[in-house]
Amino acid sequence: MKHLKAIDMAGLCARLRWGAGVAARRLGMPGMLAAALGVGMLGMHAGYLQPEKAHLEAERSARAKELAALPKRLSQARGTGLTLQAVQQLRNSEQAYSIFQILAQHGLEREQATYRREIEAKGKLRRLTIGITASGSYTGLREAMREIADQPMVRIESVSIERDKIENPIISIDMRVSLLGPDT
């Protein structure tokens, strides 16, 4: 029985060599290279790409489950549910100090700040707009902006980021933040 398998295998190898020789004569060198490339691509697809696709799909579904398990952020976190009386109790000076404190906690160095007051809500409220020039890292800025945006009656109006050199991790930041509250 083993002898028959060896004979069949030898015959199969002989037929494959004969078929390869006929194909080589008909296709020539460019055709053989193209055929070898096609067979190689099929092998790569079957051996590498298909298993990797299955692995990526499994990882994606696991990440989607993790994301679904995270707590949802409240859309009211920015103070949209506050009444006029509650807003009038806020103190702009304390809010401004907390913004500077948040920037410092996340490693951002404040270089300059400009202030502008405007009247809002028919004279009952004042808007304090602060222009802040700072420097620090991208991660520090990102975390600071998340904390600032979660404060009641605070709005980040604009952010401008500039980096001098690609190797330098320090960025220059120009930020404009508005605070709504009573005139203090």
Image: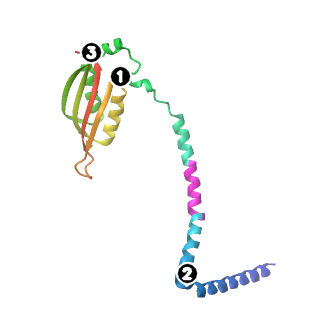
Query: Position of 27 compared to 4: left or right?
Result: left
The overriding secondary structure of the stretch rendered in magenta is: helix
Amino acid type, callout 3: Pro
The residue lying toward the viewer, choosing from 39 and 84, is 84
The residue that disc 2 covers is: 31
The mark lying in front, picked from 1 and 2, is: 2
How packed mark 2 is, by other alpha carbons closer than 10 Å (few <14, some 14-19, many 20 or more), is some
Q: Which is nearer the N-term, disc 3 or disc 1?
A: 1
How packed mark 1 is, by other alpha carbons closer than 10 Å (few <14, some 14-19, many 20 or more), is many
The circle drawn on residue 152 is 1
Measure the alpha-carbon separation of dots 3 and 2.
82 Å
The mark lying in front, picked from 3 and 1, is: 3
Residue reaching furthest to the front: 122
Relative to 161, is 181 above or below? above
- Magenta stretch: includes residue 145: no
The residue that disc 3 covers is: 182
